[in-house]
Image (cartoon, rainbow, N blue to C red):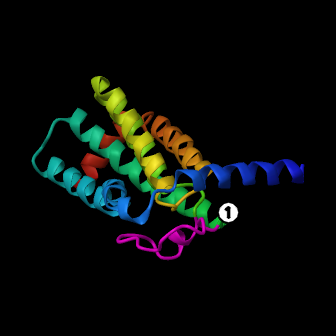
Amino acid sequence: MIDFRRTLHFLDQSLSEVLIVPNSKRDVLLWVEYLMSGLPWIIGSSLAVVYAVSDRWDINTLHKLVILNIGLLADLCIVGVLKLIIQRPRPVNNIDDLVVGAPIVDEYSFPSGHCARAAMLGTICARFFQKSRVIVTGLYILVAISRVAMGRHYCSDALAGIALGWLEGVVVLSLPISATKWLKKILR
């Protein structure tokens, strides 16, 4: 069993190293990283909920925003806890130049939070905006490739992040509209 794990780790590490791009090409990938950073998503979606409640938006739109917010908060918590439990070090090729991050949690690589967030957002968007399925799937594949290409993650980190994010999206989409109605009463 140990040999199998070592072999998998070796293959994961080898494939990840092949995908790393030179430092001169990192600028575009940094923009992909910023796009999926948690803090701007949390701030923006929280402000949208506050505005939606104060402006008396319809319950269906508010429900979508509540699902988004719960998904984002759950994603940050779940990924953070998993990183602290597993504590897989980042690849040696990682350049420590994160602009926005969580200092303790971002020392670890498994699972990729950016990939989880992208997949969770993609799952939610695919349900609410069905014509966007191809675009959002392409987006979270792009995020996964960028995380490995920057040397921030191993391939297995990115794949686990995508699987986790998809699961988070499926679970949060099951939130009943009655929960949003209850929340709306509290916020008013």
Q: Position of residue 166 (x, y in %)?
A: 50, 38
Name the residue at 45% across, 72% down: 102
Instruction: Indicate left or right for 37 with 21 as reference.
Output: left
Judge by depth and name the residue closer to the eye, 108 or 165: 108
In the image, 6 versus 103, the foreground residue is 6
Q: Main secondary structure of the magenta part?
A: loop
Q: Residues within 10 Å of mark 1 (few under 14, many from 20)?
A: few
> How many numbered dots are placed on residues in this image?
1
Q: Is residue 96 magenta?
A: yes
Locate residue 81 relative to residue 70 in the image: left or right. right
**Residue in the foreground of this view, choosing between 94 and 67:** 94
Identified at 28% across, 44% down, the residue is 65
Q: Which range of residues does the magenta coloring cover?
A: 89-108
Q: Nearer the viewer, residue 186 or 94?
A: 94
Q: Residue at x 22, y 36 (%)?
A: 61
Q: Which residue is identified by label 1?
A: 86
Residue at left offset 35%, top offset 42%? 67
> Which residue is farthest top?
131
Task: Where is residue 180? Give x, y as percent.
Answer: 32, 42
